[in-house]
Image (tube, helix red, strand yellow):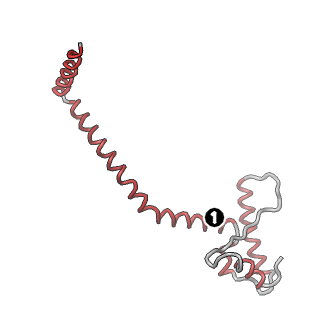
Amino acid sequence: EFTDRWEVDRYLSASGYLGDSTRPFFVALPKVRSVTSNEEFRRQNSQIGSDIVHYLCESVKGGFDKEKYGSFIGFGRLRDYLESELQQRYKEAAPATLALLEQPCAEVAVVLARADTKLQATSDVASLRRLAMLHVASISRHV
C-alpha cells in the first residue's frame, strides 16, 4: 500500500496520535484461514514478518528506515519486546517482593523452631512421662 519512504516513516512513527515514547508494532496474520497446525501457523507468522520487511525494503521508493523501525515489525519482534519488558519489570519488582516476603518467612521460621523444640521434647522419654502424668492429673481433677 505504501509507495514512498515518507509514507512508511509517517505510518510507523505514529506521529500525531501517540506519544513520543510510544511505538506501535505492525503485525499481520496469514491470509489463508484454513485449519493448520500450531507449528505451521507460527512459521507463517514468521514468514509474513519477513515478507513485510522485504517488501518495505524493495518495493517502496527510497526503502524504509530498517534501523529505526525494523524492530517494530512482526509478531516475533512484538513477542521479544514483551518478554524483555516483562523481564525488566520482574527485575525492578524483585527487591520489593523479597522485602514483603521477609516478615512471613521470619514468622514461619519462629513457628518451625517452636515445633522443632516440641518434637525434640517428645523424643525424650522422661519428658513424655512427665507430660502424660500432667495430663492424667488434669483429667483426674475433673472427675
Q: Nearer the viewer, residue 30 or 87?
A: 87
Q: Nearer the viewer, residue 122 or 64?
A: 122
* Residue at the spot 83% in from the left edge and 82% down from the top edge: 3
Q: Residues within 10 Å of mark 1 (few under 14, many from 20)?
A: few
Q: Nearer the viewer, residue 13 or 19?
A: 19
Q: Mark 1 falls on what kind of element?
A: helix
Tag 1: amino acid: Arg
- Residue wearing tag 1: 79
Q: Nearer the viewer, residue 67 or 134?
A: 134
* Residue at the spot 65% in from the left edge and 69% down from the top edge: 77
**Is 94 on the left or on the right of 136, as rendered?**
right
Q: Position of residue 36 (x, y in %)?
A: 77, 53
* Residue at the spot 18% in from the left edge and 26% down from the top edge: 125
- The quarter in which the C terminus is drawn is top left
Q: Position of residue 100 (x, y in %)?
A: 40, 56
* Residue at the spot 31% in from the left edge and 46% down from the top edge: 109
**Is 143 on the left or on the right of 84, as rendered?**
left
As drawn, 118 above or below 21: above
Question: Hey, which quadrant is residue 81 in on the image?
Answer: bottom right
- The quarter in which the N terminus is drawn is bottom right
